[in-house]
Amino acid sequence: MRLVVERLNKQIRDDMHSAAQQVHKTLRFCGVVAAPTKEIPQELEHLLLQLAEFVQVFRHHWDAVQRDFPKYRELFGGASASTSAAEDTVP
């Protein structure tokens, strides 16, 4: 039984160390400097909170654009009636 517990403990430590390395690489990729440790840094929580806030704001704006899509198409020069009629006559 003791051997099983020791193996599980080692596996958990190895997984934690691997996760910490991956988090440090992710934070470095995102431009966040964190002191190298064998544990998951607290900066990850801040990054995830900012990412969640960004996703909420993006979703809000995406939904607003989707509701008014015809207006945005007209505003930004989407296909007009004369253009689509000319395209219909091309063989």
Image: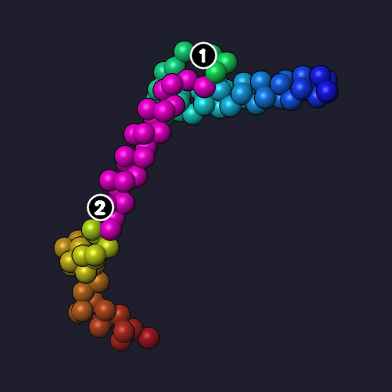
At which x and y percent is residue 66?
Answer: 27, 63
At which x and y percent is residue 48?
Answer: 40, 33
Residue that label 2 marks = 61
Q: Is residue 59 inside the magenta stretch?
A: yes
**Disc 2 to disc 1, C-alpha distance:** 37 Å
Instruction: Tell me which amino acid carries mark 2.
Output: His
Report the magenta stretch's main SS: helix
Task: Look at the numbered disc 1 and give the secondary structure of its residue.
Answer: loop
The answer to which of 23 and 40 lies nearer the viewer is 40
Identify the residue at horizontal 56%, vertical 23% (top origin): 20
The magenta span reads: 40-63
Q: For residue 36, which numbered disc appears in the image? A: 1
Instruction: Tell me which amino acid carries mark 1.
Output: Pro
The answer to which of 45 and 22 lies nearer the viewer is 45
Asked where in the image residue 46 lies, by quadrant, the reply is: top left
Q: Is residue 19 above or below residue 61?
A: above
Identify the residue at horizontal 23%, vertical 76% (top origin): 83
Does the image show residue 77?
A: no
In the rendered view, does 62 fall on the left or right side of 25?
left
At which x and y percent is residue 84?
Answer: 26, 79
The answer to which of 85 and 27 lies nearer the viewer is 27
Q: Is residue 62 above or below residue 9?
A: below
The answer to which of 88 and 55 lies nearer the viewer is 55
Asked where in the image residue 53 lies, by quadrant, the reply is: top left
Asked where in the image residue 44 lies, by quadrant, the reply is: top left
Q: Locate the C terminus and report the quarter of the image it occupies.
A: bottom left
- Mark 2 or mark 1, earlier in chain: 1
Task: Look at the numbered disc 2 and give the secondary structure of its residue.
Answer: helix
Identify the residue at horizontal 16%, vertical 63% (top origin): 75
